[in-house]
Image (tube, grey):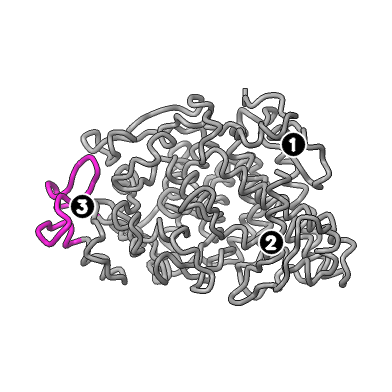
Amino acid sequence: MKRFSIIALALAVIVSFGCSKDYLDTYPTSSTSPDIILGTTDAAAVAVNGLGKLMHRQYGAYGQGYNGEGTVRLYYGEYLGNNLMKGNSTGFQSDATGNMFLNNTRNLDSYAWYYYYMLIGNANAIIKTIDDAEGTEAERAYLKAQALTYRAYAYFNLVQIYGRRWSDGPDKPSCVLRLTGDEPDNLDRSTAAQVYAQVYKDLDDAIGLFNASGKANSRKSNHIVDLDVAYGVYARAALTREDWANALKYSQMLHEKYPLMSVEDELKGFSNPNDEWIWYIYGAEDETLYFYDYFCYAAYNAQTSTTRNYPLLISRHLFDQIPATDIRRAFWLDPAGYEGTFNTNTMKANKQNSGNSLWVYGQNYAVQRGHELLSTHCIFAYMNFKISNNIQPGIGNLCLMRSSEMLLIEAEAQYRLQKEEEARDLLVELNATSLRDPAYTCTAEGEELLEQIKLYRGIELWAEGFNWFDLKRWGDSISRQTYAEGGNWMSSYAVTFGPNEKNNWTWIIPRNETDYNKGITSTSNE
């Protein structure tokens, strides 16, 4: 992790996460002290912007598709879950069937560890030195608050991936807490409870510093971390930790501040900010990741080979639960009436030319949704038309946090606090009041109401990186069916396994860490 931090520190200081041409023309070396590099608040501000840049860059050692936060969203949050598949692709079969959680040399096992500790190492350097940086007290407080928020966000994601779900794992080991960079190389893992305590502390400190700075909500664009982002990370962490009171408190604050997007915005492709977006990653032509970007893999109109041949599909089980009156049903290609025109194992149209009615339907549907496809774009039943890119090959703004998510956190927290009427009202607001589904009503009670909340998390947040994490924290099973069984999963993915199987859905500590860090006494999560 220290090796990662040295490399990443250089990157963070060189690059700035801005709207264009915001690069610092300098070159730190690994022998330069962070105290010198970050000696002024101007330099520290560049380094803080660099934290955002680390969330959106090519991680070439891992191959195409490894791009920072977009990778975590798809590869962990979605490909491992119940609601999304990459049409006709077998590349994630071993991971999605739960057979790689104990493979400590697997890319997917080591990537999140590598990426988030790179983010943590840079944040630690800023947090450690900023109090002595030349500049105003307000500037120091604001920059430290941002770095603390990034660090809390990174540790929160690490504890979800490498730790057990809260309900059965608060005292079990998860990840290694490194907070200063001065800890010994050989350091054992902390428990999930200890990591969550640190996440809470970082966020409490950040909130205090944001408020003390007088710049709590002064950002010019929502790609910049501010007080509201700290609130949002707090809401997520509290939800996963089953701390319903804090989940309610922080999600409610943001839901009340950020309006739900309009139906018009909902249908625009989820690649440009609107009033609902709380935090996002800036993406434009001068910030392109070329063929590494999230949108190269997720956008239906991306002209990349992976999207042309293997577009994202929604699970038939989820799609069939979306009411006909719900405008979100238009996010996916409904194959009703096209039986016999597609392969019932892969969902791919039998012919990829004008001789196939599903192919013609899909090509025309793309035009209706705003983007013409190439003739080489394959068409699948249930394929994604929710997400589009702005510029080829895969350029768009990636939303990390929005008000609909906060509303759904609030609804679940209200339910857990036995305030079912409030939870029902929130579901009505999300669906009927917003006009996503004007016909929606909610009279559900008890477990049925919880299932409604789960259903609408799946519909509203599809492909946004939550499904596997939700299933894990709920203790719900992975359950996928073939077409003959009522689903649309390829037979090689159609498995069922429970939350206490497959290493409790917990990724093992990567070998790259255990080879270096001899302080880890056990890689087990028992």
Q: Residues within 10 Å of mark 1 (few under 14, many from 20)?
A: some
Q: Amino acid at mark 3?
A: Pro
Given contact means CB atoms under 8 Å apart, are the residues at marks 1 and 2 in contact? no
* Sooner in the amino-acid sequence: mark 1 or mark 2: 2
Q: Name the disc covering residue 335, or none.
A: 3
The span picked out in magenta is 334-361
Q: Secondary structure at mark 2?
A: helix
* Sooner in the amino-acid sequence: mark 3 or mark 2: 2
Which quadrant is the C terminus positioned in? top right
What secondary structure predominates along the stretch shown in magenta? loop
Q: Is residue 453 visible?
A: no
Q: What distance separates the C-alpha of mark 1 from that of mark 2?
A: 28 Å
Q: Secondary structure at mark 3?
A: loop
Q: Residues within 10 Å of mark 3 (few under 14, many from 20)?
A: some
Q: Mark 2 sits on what residue?
A: 12
Q: With 30 as the anchor, is 251 left or right in this view? A: left
Q: Name the disc covering residue 194, or none.
A: 1
Q: Of residues 335 and 41, which is closer to you in this image?
A: 41
Q: Please, is residue 404 above or below residue 517 in the view?
A: below
Q: Please, is residue 271 above or below residue 413 in the view?
A: below
